[in-house]
Amino acid sequence: MCQDPNCIFCKIAAHEIPSTVVYEDDQVIAFDDLNPQAPVHTLVIPKAHYADIADDVPVETMGAMVHAVKEVAAKKDLTQGFRVISNKGADAGQTVMHFHMHVLGGKHLGEGLLPEE
Ligand code: AMP
Ligand code: ZN
């Protein structure tokens, strides 16, 4: 497994830093965001280190990520829907440089993708 010793999400994937795990399999782990932006805010990450969604993530890993998103939605009872976001780079405001998908839900999120300016 490719790990970055300075990466906080690699440490979460290795259970070296505690997190509230929602779903886990051999390729991915999902855990609640420390600073939730919605009633449900869970992060899905590959256990292997990729900087972001554009970092040559293998298609099998992407499939495992999407499967995990659906598992999170089921476990969190997001029957009315949810939103998936993946920030890449400075313009998107990415702060943790380990590929992750935000799963947001538990309330009506509205139709706009971006906060009002
Ligand atoms: P992004 O801005 O897309 O890179 O998102 C990074 C997310 O990671 C933010 O929503 C943070 O609140 C979250 N985060 C950072 N450290 C932790 C942690 N130790 N456990 C859970 N979530 C974290
Ligand atoms: Zn990492």
Image (tube, grey):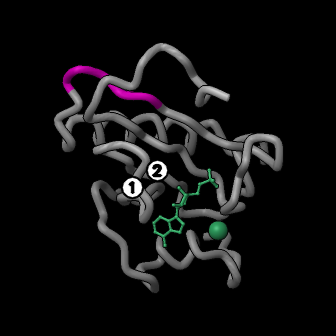
Q: Which mark is residue 22?
A: none
Residue on which disc 2 sits = 44
Which one is in front, 104 or 25?
104
Do the numbered discs 1 and 2 sit on residues whose CB atoms are within 8 Å? yes
Q: Which mark is residue 30?
A: 1
Q: Quadrant of the N terminus?
A: bottom right
Above or below, comparing residue 114 to residue 52 in the picture:
above
Q: Which residue is painted at 74% across and 41% down in the image?
A: 92
Q: Residue furthest front?
A: 117
Dividing the picture into quarters, in which one does residue 3 lie? bottom right
Helix, strand or loop at label 2? It is: strand
Amino acid on which the number 1 mark rests in the picture: Ala
Amino acid on which the number 2 mark rests in the picture: Val
| Position of residue 60 measured from the top left corner of the image (x, y, whole percent) | 56, 40
At label 2, counting other C-alpha atoms closer than 10 Å, the crowd grade (few under 14, some 14-19, many 20 or more) is many
The magenta stretch is 79-83
- Is 54 a magenta residue? no
Locate residue 20 relative to residue 93 in the image: left or right.
left
| Position of residue 102 measured from the top left corner of the image (x, y, whole percent) | 49, 44
Which one is in front, 67 or 20?
20
Q: Which residue is painted at 47% across and 77% down in the image?
A: 14
Above or below, comparing residue 48 to residue 108 in the picture:
below
Locate residue 107 relative to residue 62 in the image: left or right.
left
Above or below, comparing residue 18 to residue 54 in the picture:
below
| Magenta: main secondary structure | loop
Q: Is mark 1 within 8 Å of ligand 1?
A: no
| Position of residue 50 measured from the top left corner of the image (x, y, whole percent) | 70, 57
